[in-house]
Image (cartoon, rainbow, N blue to C red):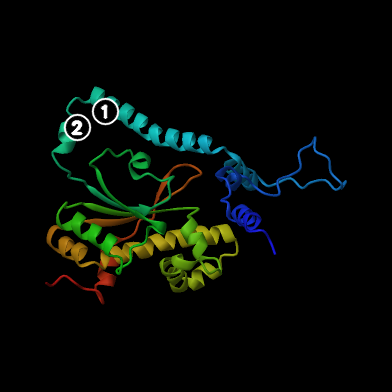
């Protein structure tokens, strides 16, 4: 029978927590050059993505903490520099900004971090009311975007509503893949529905990149239709002749916006054959 003290020490050794430094290390890393090896088979080199992941995992805990602190503080440093620059150019800038907003545009764009609405359009704070989500969708069951549209039209009195997509959209590309994406499935189904509506046009495009780009454009057009289906947009246009709805696409290769030049009034007339909500 095992001695009780020995058994206790053995149990403690088995349940002792693994040090955090060991949790951060990456197992099965390539053997260092100066280490001995019983096999002459060369070690395969990891991909760039694997090297990046390994580098992050191999960072000491204090290095990770330092990195997170630096990236956090950087935002506040940039904010201070931006505020100082604005004040130097216009001493009344923040007084005017705090007085309220009167934007001309409602911008409905993609959440992609590379497409900040104000920077790519040259707009200033207060010029655009902005809503962003994956693949710039306007779903009638999404209370977030529908509330944004209603508020922007009824209270802010915006004159233009822009739905802006972008070539190379990850959400659109994901919707083109035959893969279960979990919680994203219901959201991406809206893009798959766009493909279904325009299946004949898209299927004859042999080049995959060209077909992908066209689906990006068609998705923007369908989201413009969804905006026009809303009661707030229809009623405001009937009364005020605004807002006008636009469909744009941003290109990473040249940084330019492409106007899809939708015929707003024609699209409105077509939609109101079925979705006429102008009467209270």
Q: Nearer the viewer, residue 251 or 172?
A: 172
The crowding category of the residue bearing disc 2, from other C-alpha atoms within 10 Å (few below 14, some 14 to 19, many at least 20), is few
Residue 242 can be seen, yes or no: no
Is 123 in front, or is 271?
123
- Left or right: residue 86 versus residue 2 is left
On screen, 24 above or below 277?
above
Give residue 162's position: percent from left, percent from top: 31, 53
* Spot occupied by residue 76 in the image (x, y as percentages of width and height): 34, 32
Q: Residue at x 29, y 39 (%)?
A: 123
- Left or right, 39 with respect to 246, comes to right
* Residue 186 x, y percent position in the rendering: 42, 70
Q: Is residue 42 left or right of residue 262?
A: right
How many marks do you count on the picture? 2
Q: Which residue is mark 2?
A: 94
Q: Residue at x 37, y 35 (%)?
A: 75
Q: Position of residue 119 (x, y in %)?
A: 36, 39
Considering only vertical position in the picture, is 27 above or below 73? below
Closest to the observer: 277 or 61?
A: 61
- Position of residue 217 relative to residue 27, above or below, is below
- Name the quarter where the C terminus is drawn: bottom left
Q: Which residue sits furthest top?
A: 88
Q: Nearer the viewer, residue 202 or 1?
A: 1
Residue at left 15%, top 58%? 154
Q: Quarter of the image containing the N terminus? A: bottom right
2 and 1 marks in contact (CB < 8 Å): yes
SS of the residue at dot 1? helix
In the rendering, which numbered label is found on residue 86?
Answer: 1
Q: Residue at x 48, y 42 (%)?
A: 254
């Amino acid at each position: 029978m095992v001695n009780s003290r020995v058994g206790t020490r053995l149990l403690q050794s088995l349940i002792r927590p693994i040090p955090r430094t060991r949790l951060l290390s990456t197992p099965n890393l390539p053997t260092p050059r100066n280490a001995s090896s019983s096999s002459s088979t060369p070690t395969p080199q990891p991909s760039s993505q694997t090297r990046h992941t390994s580098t992050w995992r191999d960072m000491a805990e204090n290095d990770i903490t330092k990195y997170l602190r630096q990236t956090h503080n950087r935002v506040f440093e940039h904010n201070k520099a931006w505020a100082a620059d604005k004040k130097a150019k216009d001493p009344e800038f923040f007084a005017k900004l705090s007085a309220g907003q009167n934007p001309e545009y409602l911008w409905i764009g993609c959440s992609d971090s590379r497409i900040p609405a104000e920077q790519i359009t040259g707009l200033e704070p207060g010029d655009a009311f902005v809503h962003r989500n994956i693949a710039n969708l306007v779903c009638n069951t999404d209370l977030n975007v529908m509330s944004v549209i209603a508020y922007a039209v009824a209270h802010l009195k915006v004159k233009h509503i822009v739905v802006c997509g972008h070539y190379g959209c990850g959400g659109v590309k994901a919707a083109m893949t035959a893969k279960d994406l979990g919680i994203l499935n219901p959201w991406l189904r809206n893009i798959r529905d766009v493909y279904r509506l325009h299946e004949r046009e898209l299927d004859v495009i042999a080049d995959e990149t060209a077909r992908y780009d066209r689906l990006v454009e068609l998705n923007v057009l369908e989201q413009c239709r969804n905006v026009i289906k809303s009661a707030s947009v229809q009623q405001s246009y009937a009364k005020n002749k605004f807002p006008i709805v636009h469909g744009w696409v941003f290109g990473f290769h040249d940084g330019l916006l492409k106007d899809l030049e939708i015929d707003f009034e024609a699209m409105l007339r077509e939609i109101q054959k079925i979705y006429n909500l102008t009467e209270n």
